[in-house]
Image (cartoon, grey):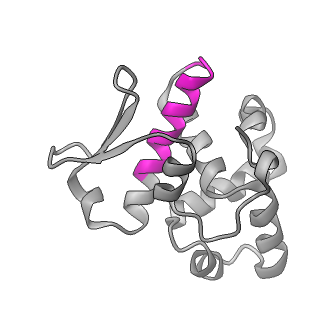
């Protein structure tokens, strides 16, 4: 599935809604781990600080959604890849670039529009579009 199949969603994008849209079950648990994708069970466990909600929940869940997508496509699994795929899901290219054109690189303004994203997520997505990022992100183009 790709956003282009249904049209890119408008911000703010909820990682919980993305999990539902991707048909990846999420189960809350009181384990200490923040979040974990279980490939054998095909679900994501959310625990620890993520139970309080806010950008940290969405960032952790988006990362685990990245693992789930990479698993689904039988792609190489590593933490950086999962983070970048999750980031592309939370901040899709079209709407995010439109917001940057309108608001500039002001993290407060972007954060007000993308309320489920932490400043770190916004900074990373901005870096993705910078020319100096170049080849580092090339292999993730199919994800966003």
Q: Residue at x 60, y 42 (%)?
A: 84
Q: Residue at x 67, y 55 (%)?
A: 125
Magenta stretch contains residue 9: no
| Residue 140 higher or lower than 6, as above or below | above
Q: Nearer the viewer, residue 32 or 28?
A: 28
In the rendered image, the quadrant that contains the N terminus is top right
Is 62 placed left or right of 4 in the picture? Answer: left
Magenta stretch contains residue 72: yes
Segment colored magenta: 60-76
Q: Residue at x 55, y 58 (%)?
A: 121
Residue 92 at x, y percent in the picture: 71, 55
The number of discs equals 0
| Residue 132 higher or lower than 138, as above or below | below
In the rendered image, the quadrant that contains the C terminus is top right
Residue 140 at x, y percent in the picture: 72, 34
Residue 46 at x, y percent in the picture: 29, 48
Residue 141 at x, y percent in the picture: 78, 36
* Magenta: main secondary structure: helix
| Residue 73 higher or lower than 88, as above or below | above
| Residue 41 higher or lower than 29, as above or below | above
Is 3 placed left or right of 75 in the picture? Answer: right
Is 123 placed left or right of 7 in the picture? Answer: left
Q: Residue at x 50, y 56 (%)?
A: 15
């Amino acid at each position: 599935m790709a956003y282009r199949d249904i049209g890119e969603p408008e911000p703010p994008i909820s990682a919980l809604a993305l999990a539902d849209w991707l048909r990846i079950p999420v189960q809350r648990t009181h384990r200490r781990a923040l979040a974990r994708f279980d490939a054998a069970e095909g679900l994501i466990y959310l625990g620890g600080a993520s139970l309080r909600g806010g950008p940290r929940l969405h960032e952790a869940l988006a990362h685990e959604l990245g693992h789930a997508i990479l698993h689904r496509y039988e792609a190489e699994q590593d933490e950086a890849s999962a983070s970048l795929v999750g980031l592309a899901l939370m901040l899709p290219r079209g709407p995010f670039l439109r917001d940057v054109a309108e608001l500039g690189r002001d993290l407060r303004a972007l954060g007000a529009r993308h309320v489920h994203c932490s400043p770190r997520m916004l900074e990373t997505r901005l870096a993705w579009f910078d020319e100096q990022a170049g080849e580092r992100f090339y292999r993730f183009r199919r994800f966003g």
